[in-house]
Image (cartoon, coloured by chain):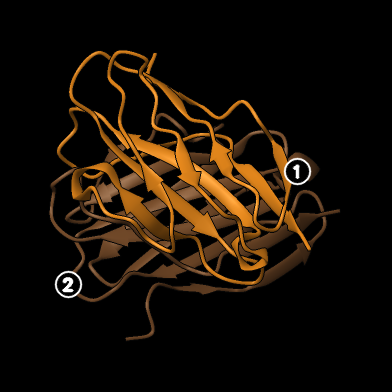
Amino acid sequence: AQRVTQPEKLLSVFKGAPVELKCNYSYSGSPELFWYVQYSRQRLQLLLRHISRESIKGFTADLNKGETSFHLKKPFAQEEDSAMYYCAYSGSSNTGKLIFGQGTTLQVKP
Amino acid sequence: DAGVIQSPRHEVTEMGQEVTLRCKPISGHNSLFWYRQTMMRGLELLIYFNNNVPIDDSGMPEDRFSAKMPNASFSTLKIQPSEPRDSAVYFCASSWGTASNQPQHFGDGTRLSIL
């Protein structure tokens, strides 16, 4: 079955430390992968998608097809990065359906 | 653009009552998604519509749940009868087109508590 796994429910780091939020998917095709973020009291929103190969708010994510991973990284965490992060993918469906992981809460301590 | 609009924001009701959640997608978007968010299971897709037609309702937990999209600007998710285990935050999202790489835009959610 198609599945997205985020192994950590909570990741706690100090400000300035590197951050890596893990995401693994189970799909053998050519998936589209995304990271969504939900800041406190705000709507869930798109952070970045792998096809754009962009860096948003200092975050990057590289698709590793060999390891079926799409980990989210930032070299120096900021307190305002504290939020819930969801990894999601869209498989071969052409209707925009996404499958989300269970989410990881990132807590950046001062 | 107000984005995806959901109502009510909060709903508290007694078990056995009918609950109706509402969603207005972004104008021009032709895909609409209903999700449920809980601590235990994270974000689960319940059902999604494309051009007002239900495409996949395999995530709907039971027959007590039903969803409709009578037109392009309105959708409802109904639970009848409601049970305490239905307590969760329910999100509606919409997107444009059928390409899998189009971002979904989420509403603020409805926080549902069944007593």
Chain of the residue that carries numbered disc 1 in the rendered image = B
First along the sequence among labels 2 and 1: 2
Q: Position of residue B38 (x, y in %)?
A: 68, 43
Q: Colour of chain A?
A: orange
Q: SS class of the residue under badge 2?
A: loop
Residue at 18% over, 27% down: A92
Front residue of this view, candidates B67 and B109: B109
Dividing the picture into quadrants, the one containing residue A109 is: bottom right
Residue located beneath label 2 in the image: B28
The numbered dot on residue B83 is 1
Chain of the residue that carries numbered disc 2 in the rendered image = B
Residue at 59% over, 49% down: B79
| Left or right: residue A100 compared with residue B100 | right
Q: Position of residue B67 (x, y in %)?
A: 42, 50
Q: Position of residue B80 (x, y in %)?
A: 62, 48
Q: Is residue A7 above or below residue B34?
A: above
Q: Is residue B79 above or below residue A3?
A: below
Front residue of this view, candidates A56 and B67: A56
Q: SS class of the residue under badge 1?
A: loop
Q: Is residue A83 above or below residue A2?
A: below
Instruction: Give neighbour class at mark 2: few <14, some 14-19, many 20+ (Cα, 10 Å).
Output: few
Front residue of this view, candidates B115 and B102: B102
Q: Colour of chain B?
A: brown
Dividing the picture into quadrants, the one containing residue B95 is: bottom left
Q: Position of residue B40 (x, y in %)?
A: 71, 34
Q: Amino acid at mark 2?
A: Gly
